[in-house]
Image (spheres, helix red, strand yellow):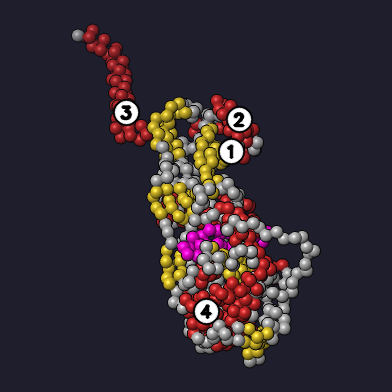
Amino acid sequence: MSREREISNRYAPFQKRIRVAAVLISAAVLILVLRLWALQILEGDRLLLLSANNRLRLRPVEAPRGLIFDRNGELMVENLASFDLYVTPEDMPDVEETTRRLAAILQSSPDELRQRVSQGQGSQLEPMLLRKGVDERIVTAIEEHKIDLPGVSLRVRPVRTYPHGGSAATLLGYVAEVSHAQLTSKEFRDFHPGETMGQAGIERRYDAFIRGVDGGEQVEVDALGRVSRLIQQVEPRSGLSLYLTLDNRLQRVAEEALQGRSGALIAVHPSTGEILAMVSQPSYDPNQFSQRMTPEQWRKLIADPHHPMQNKGLQGQYAPGSIFKLVTALAALEKGAITPATQFSCNGSFSLGSHLFHDWKKGGHGTLNLQQAIANSCNIYFYNTALKTGIEEITRVAQELGLGTPSGLGLGGEARGVIPPKTAGPSEAGGWYPGNTVMAGIGQGMVTVTPMQAVMMVSAIANGGTLYRPWVVRKVETLDRELIEEYGPELVRKVNLDPDNLAIVREGMQAVVSEGTGGRAKIPGLRVAGKTGTAQVVENGGPQRGDRRDHAWFVAFAPADNPQIAIAVVVEHGGFGGQVAAPIAKSLLEAWFKLPKESRPAQVAESEPTEGD
């Protein structure tokens, strides 16, 4: 018994150690089991997702936007393939070495490139856009050294391209990334950073049709971030194509005619409201928005004093000058203040109280009736006519013809213009006096219109009294030419004006071209009706040079007896409408009716005229 106790005493320390070891081992096993349980049960889904993310990549595939064609099927806007450079920092075993090699290919600073990679926003597993639209040399170099550039990848995306550069740019608009300010608004809640959309013009107005539906790819990558296999693919769906009312041939002629000048030109079909050409000069190249524009480029564009991004046809507000005499004449006829035979004598000046108002022609025009007054754009005649008519009727007729209200084209940002209120009188704030009526009667003072309003006004006169809403998209189709939407003329109203009075004014407009101030728009074999206008920028008698020169207007339609086209031209600081704007409209009419351009013999340069309209 003592022997057993002795042995027991001898092994007691070891047994104690064994028990302690067993407890520790059991505790370790329990901890391990609990950890495994936590990893498998509690965190299993999360870890599985992390594992999948480590080897799987989702790559969005941008849908190409729909194409845009002119009325004859000529391509105006398309898409071209562009390569974008992406980096995934997580897939770079040695960021410093990879960025050094990449910097050599990109010919950029390694330190700057390394800093950009390290500052990549979002998840480390999410590829970061490093550069858009890399050229062919860079693409080739990256593909050749792909094994040495882990985490570096190229993606192909469709880029909006405008083959004719700045042609019709302010009408077509441009495509660019959604801005931070847009992303914070409710209207753009479905967009994500880096996504592009139409930002102006037709591209913006019809973005829902044009943009298409993006696709995507799920790929598996190896340890170096290289694609090993394609797991799943959803093909993108191209956007719908637009067919415009615009005639690209006529558009180019109009832009060439206005080249080098600042202003606007709009041509429409007077019996439908279809826009045939729309020019705003100077213009900009929308292609520069397809890639990321630098802040310096953007500042230079918006700081340009000639406002190249403004659609002057819709947003430019100008004193109409003498083209407004058409409104005054109609108002006077409607009220019965004058008849076509009514005559006024013009000696070059007109007195009203202590104020003296001048005619544009020194010495005056003598005695004229209404047709002669329209043909020669006599200010004195229309001073008298405006006073006899009153501002209320002049305003009513102006509004009937669509002045003072946006045309409703729907491209956004359209100006209203300014037309005096019907109740204008001395009791109005600021006062309204006979002198204001005199100036309004010739399109000066408190009267402004947009070129779009001017051309729609002339269209209503030309077609006998129907005001149409201007429109520019004829139809929407799929790439397979399946018709989705089709548009047509939209009647705004039949104007409340006597057709006989409209006919009288049309006769006066024919006389403008055949024997009056619009002679430079005369075309053999084509009856052209028009009206010149010279809108003062400075007080009468002021300097007429550079940006202090008057704005030149010309409105017209042809043929006079069956109008197929109506035109409004305004040249900012161009001088006299008959001298500057009328020849521009003539070039457009010759092109539209496919008439030979009238040959003009070389002449000794004439001195600049000192008067005109």
When the figure is inspected, residue 472 is found, relative to residue 108, above or below; the finding is below
Q: Residues within 10 Å of mark 2 (few under 14, many from 20)?
A: few
Q: Quadrant of the C terminus?
A: bottom right
Precedes in sequence: disc 1 or disc 3: 3
Front-most of residues 195 and 70: 70
Front-most of residues 610 and 445: 610
Between marks 4 and 1, how big is the CA–CA gap? 61 Å
- Residue 134 has which mark? 1
Nearer the viewer's eye, disc 3 or disc 4? 4
Residue 420 visible within the image:
no
Q: Which stretch appears magenta?
A: 258-284
Q: Quadrant of residue 340?
A: bottom right
- Residue 141 has which mark? 2
Between marks 2 and 3, how big is the CA–CA gap? 47 Å
Q: Can you give x and y, in whole percent of width and height, for residue 238 in the image? A: 44, 43
Q: Name the residue located 47 percent from the left edge and 64 percent from the top edge.
A: 271
The residue under label 3 is: 36
Between marks 3 and 4, how big is the CA–CA gap? 92 Å
